[in-house]
Image (tube, grey):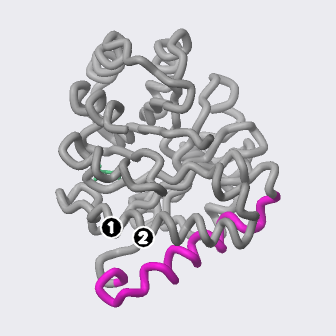
């Protein structure tokens, strides 16, 4: 059975003290975790090791980095590599978030290399895809997302590709308060699963976890997660509030 994941993407928010308090509060709630449900904290780099130490005794909770570089090591001042993340026990890395694509010029080819580095280190990529508002308005979102998958994922052999989680995040819904309707989310998730099935086979696609991201919050999580192809969420704003994150984790 495929995993259900609620991943909090803190982005560039929270002091270390606030982050620490947030994670303590979430872990203290002692949610009944099934084997299929995972909680992930995508913390800023300087906090990862400490957050990793906090979650390590709690089954079902993991850390994620919000990015990593496309090379293993070397003269790349300011960058963080996948082997560095591996060396402190980080389990996931968000790659291809629309903010990275838009503000830091990350493109499909660069993301393909980042995915390779993460997978070589046994770190599971949470690969983000999704369209801007103009693309949705022109009704070309399926072609857009199909191209994002092809450019960055399709070179990966099935054994490694099985480690990937996909997050569908319509850009027009990120941080805007606008959420994709359950129907829009389900349509796109089913489309993604179908494309992956064509490339990697039906069984593979059935095991793939596909998250929805974009203004997901306690008031809409249950409806979104109730869709047959929505396996959880990548949560921005609502992941900064312990009570909201906990409610979202209980929305399956
Ligand atoms: P949001 O962000 O929940 O604040 O819309 C989601 C994301 O960007 O991952």
- Secondary structure mostly taken by the magenta-highlighted segment of the chain: helix
Percent coordinates x, y for residue 235 in the rendering: 34, 44
Task: Tell me, yes or no, whether the two marked residues, 2 and 1, touch with CB atoms within 8 Å.
Answer: yes
141 or 21, which is in the foreground?
141
Residue 51 placement, left or right of 111: left
Ligand 1 neighbours mark 2 (CB distance < 8 Å): no
Percent coordinates x, y for residue 191 in the rendering: 52, 71
Percent coordinates x, y for residue 18 in the rendering: 26, 21
Percent coordinates x, y for residue 159 in the rendering: 81, 50
Query: Residue beneath label 1, please?
Result: 183
Assign the N terminus to one quadrant of the image.
top right
Residue 148 placement, left or right of 109: left
Answer above or below: position of 32 versus 116.
above
Crowding at mark 1 (Cα within 10 Å: few <14, some 14-19, many 20+): few
Instruction: State whether residue 103 appears in this view.
Output: no
Assign the C terminus to one quadrant of the image.
top left
Residue 16 placement, left or right of 80: left
Query: Residue beneath label 2, please?
Result: 187
Taking the magenta stretch, the answer to whether it contains residue 138 is yes
Q: Where does the magenta region start and end?
A: 135-157
Residue at image location 43% in from the left, 38% down from the top? 7
Answer above or below: position of 75 versus 248.
below
| Badge count | 2
Q: Quadrant of residue 178?
A: bottom left
Residue 56 placement, left or right of 28: right
Answer above or below: position of 180 versus 47.
below
Residue at image location 65% in from the left, 49% down from the top? 207
Residue at image location 45% in from the left, 55% down from the top? 228
Taking the magenta stretch, the answer to whether it contains residue 88 is no
Secondary structure under the numbered disc 1 in the rendered image: helix
Residue at image location 69% in from the left, 45% down from the top? 163
């Amino acid at each position: 059975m495929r995993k259900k994941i609620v991943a909090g993407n803190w982005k560039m928010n929270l002091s270390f003290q606030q982050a620490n308090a947030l994670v303590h509060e979430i872990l203290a709630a002692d949610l009944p975790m099934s084997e299929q449900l995972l909680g992930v904290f995508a913390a800023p780099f300087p906090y990862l090791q400490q957050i990793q130490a906090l979650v390590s005794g709690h089954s079902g909770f993991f850390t994620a980095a919000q990015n990593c570089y496309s090379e293993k090591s070397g003269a790349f001042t300011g960058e963080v590599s996948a082997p560095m993340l591996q060396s402190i026990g980080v389990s996931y890395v968000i790659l291809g978030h629309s903010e990275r694509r838009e503000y830091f010029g990350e493109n499909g080819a660069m993301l393909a290399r980042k995915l390779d580095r993460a997978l070589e280190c046994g770190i599971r990529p949470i690969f983000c895809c999704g369209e801007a508002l103009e693309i949705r308005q022109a009704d070309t979102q399926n072609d857009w997302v199909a191209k994002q998958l092809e450019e960055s994922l399709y070179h990966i052999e099935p054994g490694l590709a099985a480690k990937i989680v996909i997050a569908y995040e319509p850009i027009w819904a990120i941080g805007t308060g606008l959420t994709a309707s359950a129907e829009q989310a389900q349509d796109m998730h089913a489309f993604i699963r179908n494309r992956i099935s064509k490339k990697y086979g039906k069984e593979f696609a059935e095991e793939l976890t596909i998250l929805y991201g974009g203004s997901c919050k306690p008031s809409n999580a249950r409806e979104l997660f109730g869709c047959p192809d929505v396996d959880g969420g990548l949560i921005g704003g609502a992941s900064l509030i312990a009570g909201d994150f906990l409610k979202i984790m209980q929305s399956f």
